[in-house]
Image (tube, coloured by chain):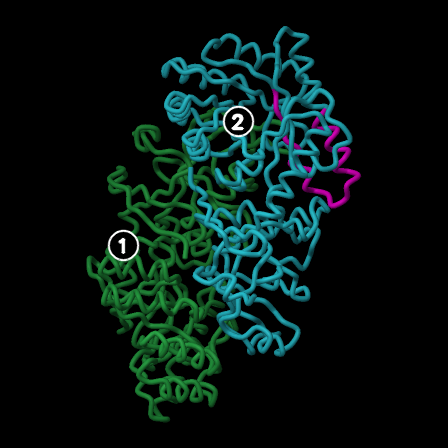
Chain colours: A cyan, B green
Amino acid sequence: MSATTMFAGLHTPHLILDADRLERNAARMRSRCDALGVTLRPHLKTAKSTDVARVAANGKRGPISVSTLAEAEYFAAAGWRDILYTTAIAPAKLSRAHHIQHEHGARLLLVLDSPEAVAVMGEAAAALGARFGILIEVDCGEHRSGTEPASQELVAIARAIEARSPQLDLMGVMTHAGHSYRFDDPAPVRALAEVERYAAVASAEFLRKHGYACPIVSVGSTPTLMFAEHLVGVTEVRAGIYLFGDLSQLSRAVCTQDDIAVSVLAAVIGHQRRGPTPSLILDAGALALSKDDGANRFMPNAGYGLVCDAVTLAPLDALAVATVHQEHGGVPVPDESWFERLPIGSFVRILPGHACLTCAAYTSYAVLRGGKLVEEWPRIGGW
Amino acid sequence: MSATTMFAGLHTPHLILDADRLERNAARMRSRCDALGVTLRPHLKTAKSTDVARVAANGKRGPISVSTLAEAEYFAAAGWRDILYTTAIAPAKLSRAHHIQHEHGARLLLVLDSPEAVAVMGEAAAALGARFGILIEVDCGEHRSGTEPASQELVAIARAIEARSPQLDLMGVMTHAGHSYRFDDPAPVRALAEVERYAAVASAEFLRKHGYACPIVSVGSTPTLMFAEHLVGVTEVRAGIYLFGDLSQLSRAVCTQDDIAVSVLAAVIGHQRRGPTPSLILDAGALALSKDDGANRFMPNAGYGLVCDAVTLAPLDALAVATVHQEHGGVPVPDESWFERLPIGSFVRILPGHACLTCAAYTSYAVLRGGKLVEEWPRIGGW
C-alpha cells in the first residue's frame, strides 16, 4: 500500500497511533506489574484519552493517575472512579476537584508535601464541605517536590492531616524517581528503583509506627518499573509513557524502536538546496513536534524526531528533524538523491523525542490496526 | 486589588492578554508601516484569534498572513478575504485550500519555491478546477526555504507558473529574514533588513524585466521591520510577534518589558527546601510554557520565563522558571524568605520566552483592560 492511500484524508501534520504496538506495550506492563505483585495505576498524562486508558487496563476502568484537573474531569465524566491527581493542587482548584467528586461519584486522591499545604487545603476543604483522600509525597532524590522520607517532617504532615479529618483523609505515601531519566544504563536505574521503593516503603512503615494506617504506597516511573528487581512493600505503581514509547525511552533502553506506538505524519513541502547541506522541508515544526530535545542526551542525533518511512515506520537511514520553526521542520540529507526518493508531497512519519509533549499538540489520534487506518480517537488538552 | 480578586474564577495555568499593551503594540507597528510606506499584513500565527486580528488592523478585516490551513479556514469563515498562507503547501492540502476559497469567498495566496512544486500544485489545481494566487519565495540568507533571488531559477519558476495559468496566478515574491533573530544589536539587524528588502525587490525587478508583473513584494520579520531604514520597492510586510512581545524579542531589543502583552498566570503549589537551592514550585510547566529556551541566547537567565508579580507584572527580582516538568515549573529563590512572600496558593505571572509556542497551549486569552479582567477571547490551534 502506498502512503497516500494508507493515510488518505488526513491533514498533515497528524498524530498516528499504532494500536497493535499500544496493546503490546500495555500487556507487557500489566504482566510486569503482575510479576512484581503491584497494582498498576496508569498515568494518563501522556495519552489523555479514554480509548487509550481502556487499552491500558485491558478494557477495565481501573485506578488511574492524571496530571491536570481537566484530565480528572474528563475521565470522571467517562466513568473512571479512582483518580490520583499527581500534581500538588493549587487551593483555588479545590472547588473544582470537589465538584468532580460530587458530580461524577469519583474519588480524587490529592498529593501534598508540607504542613503549610495541609493547612491551606484543610481550610478550603472545610469551607467547601469537601473530603479528599491524601497521599503525602516524599522526595526520593529528584528534589522536584516531596518531603524527607521516613522523617519527623513526614509525621508532622500526617498529624496535620489527621487534625483536618474528615475533610482530609490520609491514604498513604507516594514518590517519583524522575531522576531515573538521567541514565541510559539499566544498572543505575535498577539502583534508583530500589531507592524509590525504599523511600516510599520506609515512609509508610514510619507512619504506621506512629499510628497512621497508610494503605497506599505508590511509586513509579517507566524506567524504574521496567528495571526494578522487586517492589516489596509497594502497593501500586504509576507510569504512562510505556504505553507509547518515544526516542527518550529508546535512548535509555526502556523500549525498542518497534515499541514506539506514536508518530507524526508529515508531508515534504520543500527541497532546500541552498543551506550548508541539502535538506528536506517538512510541514511538521515546533508546534507539531514540540521543542523538547531531551532524547539527544543519549541519542545525540535524535534532533526533534527521527524520520521514518510513512508505511513501514522503518527509519530512513538516520534522517532526523534537525531544525524546527513554528511550522517547518528541516531534515538534512546526505545528498540530493533524497529529493527524488522523497518528492514534494511525499509522506513520512516522525518518531517523537518526547511523546508527552508531542501528543499535547493534537486533539486526536488516527489509529492504525494491522497497518490500516481504522478510527480516530479523541484526546483532551488544557487544564 | 489582590491577585486572587483580580483573577478570581480563572484556573491556573491560564493565558492572560493585556489589551492595553496589545493596542499600543499594534498602533506602533501601524505607524511604523505608514512611515515606511508599506501595507501591513499581520502574521496571525502567534495570536490565532479574530479579536486580536481586529486590534492589529484597527478594527478592519484587512490582509493577513497565516501559518496553517486551520487558521486560514478560521479567519475566512469570520470574514477575512485576503489571506497569505506563508508555509509551503503540501499538495494533499490543496483541496481544502480550494474549499476555503470557494466556501468563504476568500482569496488564498500560496507560496512555493521550485519548478517541481509548480508542477505538483498546477496538476492538483487543474484536477480541482481551482485557482490560486502564488508568491514565489526567495531565500535572503536564512536558507530555511526559498529560491535564489533575482536568478534564472526564479525566472524558471515564474515561467512554470505562467504555463499553469489560469490555475496558478503569479502575484509576486516574498522573503523572510528569520536570521534576524541571530543578533541582539540593532546594527546587524538593520543590515539584514536591507538584505531582506533587496532580495525581494531585486527579484521582483528581475521578474518584471522578464515580463512578469509581480504586483506583490512581501518581506518581514518583527526585528527587521522595527529596524529597517527604508523599504523602498516593498509593497507589503509580514510580522506577528510584535503584537504580543516576549523575552526573545526583549532580549533582542525589539520591545521593552512593558510592551509584553501576554503572560501565564500560575499558582505556587509547593515550596521545595531540599534541592541545591530553595525553589518555588508552580503549576506551570513544559505544557503551559513550552520548552522553547531561545530567549536564553541573549538573556541567559530567562529560563522558561520570568516570574512577575501577578497584579503589576513587575519582575520579582530576577526569578525565572529554571526547570520544567510536564506540569511543574521550578523557580529557584535566593532564600526561604520567598516562601513567606509567596505562600502556597499565591498567583504569579510569567513572561514567556517565546510567545508563539507558549500561546499554542491555550484555547483562549483572559483579557485585561485597565488592569481588570474584562473578557475571554477564543483562539484556535491545530492544523
Tag 2 residue: A84
- Where residue A177 sits, quadrant-wise, is top right
Q: Is residue B274 above or below residue B80?
A: above
**Where residue A84 sits: x, y (%)?**
53, 26
Distance from Cα at disc 2 to Cα at disc 1: 38 Å
Three-letter amino acid code at the position of disc 2: Leu
In this view, the residue farthest toward the left is: B59
Q: Secondary structure at mark 2?
A: strand
In the foreground, B149 or B277:
B149
Horizontal relation, residue A70 to residue A178: left or right: left
A185 lies left or right of B254: right
Do callouts 2 and 1 mark residues in contact (Cβ within 8 Å)? no
Rendered residue at 34%/45% (across/down): B364
Q: Residue furthest right?
A: A187
Label 1: few (<14), some (14–19) or many (≥20) C-alpha neighbours in 10 Å = many
Please provide the residue range marked out in magenta. Answer: A173-197
Residue found at x 34% / y 54%: B48
Secondary structure at numbered mark 1? helix
Determine whether, in the image, residue A232 is placed left or right of residue A335: right
Vertical placement of residue B4 versus A183, above or below? above
Is residue A71 located in the magenta-colored stretch of the structure? no
Q: Position of residue A175 (x, y in %)?
A: 63, 27
Mark 2 packing: few (<14 Cα in 10 Å), some, or many (20+)? many
Q: In the image, which is nearer the foreground, mark 2 or mark 1? A: 2
Q: Give whichever of B263, B333 is nearer the camera.
A: B263
- Residue A252 location (% of width, % of height): 71, 46
> Which residue is tagged 1?
B50
Counting the numbered discs, the total is 2
Q: Is residue B61 above or below residue B287?
A: below
Residue at position x 42%, y 41% in the image: A382
At x 50%, y 74%, the residue is A344
